[in-house]
């Protein structure tokens, strides 16, 4: 055969075949290597072996910080109003909206002679307040009447106009003679580093620091106002040069903010550790609140936002931040845009034109609220199953979540509870969207052991109440 | 005239002396504020414990006149002798800025004041670390000490890190006496030489139950188990059996991806049996039996796993079942074929 080919195949033909073979082979080899790497990486990890020391009571568990929600500007109107009742049930502490200048026709006129009409934006703010939340207004984007080339992602032709717009906005909502709202958060811009929103940098012609400084000037000029919070930079991620650059700006900073779209919940923990550490040399700023003003597992639209995957990711992220977390962690977003009939929207609730249905992630927040109390020592978390414990009144609770970012890992999680008072306990297992059981257990040595089936993307609370 | 001048000078001196004293005092205070003067110490500074004892060390701060915003604490210790269990904030530091991290030989946390207007001042406890003593230290005690990366930020100071001094704690661990209670240590699962059992009966009066808790419901009025016994590899139609008060109605609910509910009646001996009429899916299930008694409802439950070949392997290996090995091997196989083909043609061409 070889001899035959050697005789029959012209040299040019063999060259061509060789080249074609190599061209086809190389991408396939790359795919194979990548798939193998992914497969191996999925296989590595540690199962949880939870141990709770009921006698070691730690600090109070904070549950307010995750009752924060953000709404994108996918429609130029009051998107929250149609779902206000459902939003109120989320017990929101704060709700963020952006696009306030380009969606609500607030600013008109010309440079040095600006007019303001807050009527449409007032409706949005009124809806937010009606849900029991305070507003966080993302001061975005540049009103077209003052923007260079009329583009809402450009700097203004005259920075004093931008200052005037900010001053007027703050006076309108925080002004004692106007809306008279207390504790409103004002955030300078939204994702300034993103191309879509202007690709601002920390210097140069489109300097975010300049944008911020002129906005801060407007904040300082606002008179007869209630206390308010003013900050930024609301970047697409936590970037040290933006945080430190802003810290060095000398401008008023009441909070630092950024967005986090990370599939690994443990990165949220690392981010929090990092930002605190970066700001240690700035004692005057190190205590300022940190706000994650949007978060999710991906910034892209995904059908997984409508599944228990998203719910488990949210729960696993909250667990990572349950101690020493940010002031607020804003879930993005409240309600889908109008075109996500395929279920790929970021919303906790589908759009009114698509049934206005609560998705699995919607139910996570109230579920974890049951963990209010004082944190109790819990160890033995694994790669997939994580959790924390708390004690309130006479009940010990253990929250467990199994989040597998890349698959459907199932494990039988051993749970050992130590240093209990001997006696009989009512033991409950309550899973979100799953089983709910109740039994009685008697312990003579203060130790109770259970094995809990943790299916992928599930969360549950184990409760022990002494009879 | 001389008297007037003398009088004016005297008044000026009388004014100047207290003003000067006040200014000097103010300057001294300013200098004091500008100088780093904060120290950290562990309390108690020396402690003796038995093997297995749980004890706490308090991180105490003396701000020495500084106004402290945050304290980033890093402690190191001999992980072969001690095990840190937890770290949290103390009463003088009302806020946890960055969560505690407990590692092997290290423990850290960042704690601070509520706001710049209410800085940490004076002396008190800003963090509490809980340890478990593991093995005797012998004649030489071990030290728990602050790592050099520990940082205390002071407000309105020339240099932000105002920490000037740290004091460690000495820990002596002696042999445990027979009467000393031993706190159970749960070993990390990955250290276990054998696979973790897939399911453990969570509620049963069977004598084979190994849970250290006394597992029973209403003094064994109601029990449930599998007739085949092997809860970790049950068949797809396992025979569920149990004991209940004779003649009582027992509701059986099987929870899994599907939910099956059945009602059976215990015989004159209190025995009941139920076999699902359809195959249960592979994976984890839970059966809950309940019945009404004169003192109210009682329930009993048990976990079991219907084991198929594919899930057995993936679960025992803690392997995510996501991903497909065939999709991985196929391009790898095709790629190897192309490599061989390429080598063949290359060889043919060269020869």
Image (cartoon, rainbow, N blue to C red):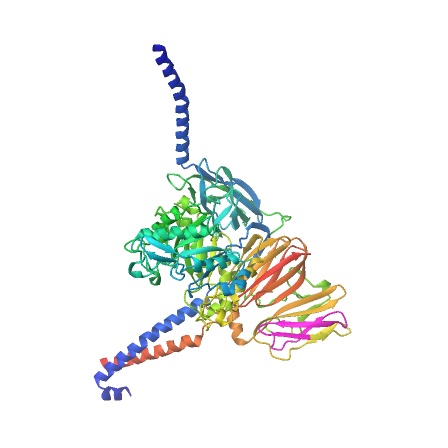
**Residue sitting nearer the eye, B296 or A328:** A328
**Residue at left 37%, top 73%?**
A32
Check the image and name the residue furthest to the top.
B2
Which quarter of the picture shows residue A116? bottom left
Q: Is residue B121 left or right of residue A237?
A: right
Question: In the rendered image, which quarter contains the C terminus of chain A?
Answer: bottom right
Q: Magenta region: which residues?
A: B234-262
- Label count reads 0
**Residue at left 73%, top 63%?**
B219
Q: Is residue A118 left or right of residue B172?
A: left
Viewer can see residue A209 = yes
Q: Is residue B340 left or right of residue B218?
A: left
Examine the structure image and report whether residue B237 is included in the region drawn in magenta: yes
**Residue sitting nearer the eye, A83 or A179:** A179
**Residue sitting nearer the eye, B260 or B280:** B260
Check the image and name the residue furthest to the right.
B268
Examine the structure image and report whether residue B213 is included in the region drawn in magenta: no
Q: Position of residue B52 (x, y in %)?
A: 58, 50
Q: Position of residue A236 (x, y in %)?
A: 38, 59
**Residue sitting nearer the eye, A64 or A21:** A64
Q: Position of residue B206 (x, y in %)?
A: 68, 67
Question: In the rendered image, which quarter contains the N terminus of chain A?
Answer: bottom left
Viewer can see residue A245 = no
Q: Position of residue B99 (x, y in %)?
A: 48, 51
- Against B96, residue A366 (above or below) is below
């Amino acid at each position: 055969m070889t001899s035959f080919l050697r005789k029959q195949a012209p040299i040019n033909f063999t060259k061509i075949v060789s080249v074609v073979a190599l061209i086809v082979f190389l991408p396939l080899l790359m795919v194979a290597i990548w798939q193998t790497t992914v497969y191996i990486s999925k296989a590595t990890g540690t199962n949880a072996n939870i141990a709770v020391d009921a006698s070691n009571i730690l600090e109070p568990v904070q549950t307010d910080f995750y009752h924060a929600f953000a709404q994108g500007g996918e429609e130029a109107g009051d998107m929250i109003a149609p779902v206000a009742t459902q939003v109120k049930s989320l017990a929101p502490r704060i709700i963020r909206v952006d696009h306030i200048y380009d969606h609500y026709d607030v600013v008109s006129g010309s440079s040095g002679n600006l007019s303001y009409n807050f009527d449409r934006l007032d409706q949005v703010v009124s809806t937010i307040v009606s849900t029991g939340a305070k507003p966080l207004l993302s001061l975005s984007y540049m009103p077209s009447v003052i923007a260079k080339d009329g583009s809402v992602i450009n700097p203004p032709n005259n920075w004093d106009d931008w200052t005037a717009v900010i001053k007027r906005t703050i006076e309108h909502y925080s002004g004692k003679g106007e809306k008279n709202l207390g504790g409103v958060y004002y955030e300078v811009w939204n994702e300034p580093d993103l191309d879509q929103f202007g690709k601002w940098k920390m210097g140069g012609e489109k300097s975010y620091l300049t944008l911020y400084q002129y906005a801060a000037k407007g904040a300082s000029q606002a008179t007869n106002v209630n206390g308010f919070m003013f900050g930024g930079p609301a970047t697409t991620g936590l970037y040290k040069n933006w945080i430190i650059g802003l810290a060095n700006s000398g401008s008023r900073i009441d909070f630092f903010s950024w967005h986090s779209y990370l599939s690994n919940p443990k990165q949220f923990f690392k981010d929090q550790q990092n930002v605190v550490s970066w700001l240690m040399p700035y004692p005057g700023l190190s205590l300022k609140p940190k706000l994650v003003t949007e978060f999710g597992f991906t910034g892209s639209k995904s059908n997984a936002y409508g599944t228990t995957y998203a719910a488990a990711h949210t729960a696993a992220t909250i667990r990572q931040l349950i101690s020493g977390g940010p002031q607020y962690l804003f879930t993005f977003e409240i309600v889908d845009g109008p075109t996500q009939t395929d279920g790929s929207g970021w919303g906790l609730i589908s759009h009114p034109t698509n049934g206005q249905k609560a998705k699995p992630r919607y139910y996570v927040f109230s579920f974890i609220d049951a963990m209010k109390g004082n944190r109790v020592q819990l160890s033995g978390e694994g790669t997939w199953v994580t959790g924390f414990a708390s004690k309130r009144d006479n009940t010990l609770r253990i929250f467990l979540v199994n989040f597998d970012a890349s698959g459907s890992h199932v494990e039988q999680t051993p749970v050992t509870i130590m240093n209990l008072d001997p006696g009989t306990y009512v033991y409950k297992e309550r899973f979100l969207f799953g089983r709910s059981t109740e039994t009685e257990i008697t312990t003579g040595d203060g130790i109770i052991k259970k094995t809990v089936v943790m299916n992928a993307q599930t969360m549950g609370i184990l409760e022990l109440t002494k009879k | 005239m001389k008297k007037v001048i003398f009088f004016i000078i005297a008044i000026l001196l009388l004014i100047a002396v207290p003003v000067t004293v006040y200014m000097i005092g103010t300057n001294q205070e300013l200098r004091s504020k500008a100088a780093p003067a904060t120290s950290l110490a562990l309390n108690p500074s020396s402690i003796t414990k038995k093997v297995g004892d749980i004890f706490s060390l308090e991180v105490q701060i003396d701000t020495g006149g500084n106004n402290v915003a945050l304290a980033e604490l890093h402690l190191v210790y001999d992980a072969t002798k001690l095990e840190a269990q937890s770290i949290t904030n103390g009463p003088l530091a009302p806020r946890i800025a960055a969560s505690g991290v407990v590692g092997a030989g290290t423990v850290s946390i960042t704690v601070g004041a509520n706001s710049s207007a209410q800085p940490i001042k004076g002396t008190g406890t800003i963090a509490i670390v809980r340890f478990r003593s593991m093995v005797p230290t012998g004649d030489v005690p071990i030290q728990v000490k602050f790592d050099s990366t520990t940082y205390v930020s002071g407000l309105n100071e020339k240099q932000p890190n105002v920490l000037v001094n740290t004091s460690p704690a000495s820990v002596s661990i002696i042999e445990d006496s027979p009467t000393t209670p031993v706190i159970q240590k749960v070993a990390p699962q990955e250290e276990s030489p054998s696979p973790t059992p897939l399911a453990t009966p969570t509620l049963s009066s069977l004598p084979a139950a190994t849970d250290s808790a006394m597992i029973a419901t209403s003094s064994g009025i109601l029990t449930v188990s599998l007739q085949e016994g092997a809860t970790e590899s049950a068949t797809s139609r396992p025979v569920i059996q149990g004991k209940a008060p004779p003649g009582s109605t027992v509701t059986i609910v099987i929870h899994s991806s599907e939910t099956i509910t059945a009602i059976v009646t215990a015989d004159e001996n209190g025995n009941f049996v139920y076999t699902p009429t359809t195959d249960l899916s592979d994976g984890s299930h839970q059966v809950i039996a309940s019945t009404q008694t004169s003192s109210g409802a009682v329930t009993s439950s048990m976990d079991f796993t219907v084991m198929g070949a594919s899930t057995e392997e993936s679960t025992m290996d803690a392997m995510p079942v996501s991903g497909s090995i065939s999709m991985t091997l196929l391009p790898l196989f095709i790629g190897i074929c192309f490599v061989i083909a390429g080598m063949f043609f290359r060889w043919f061409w060269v020869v």
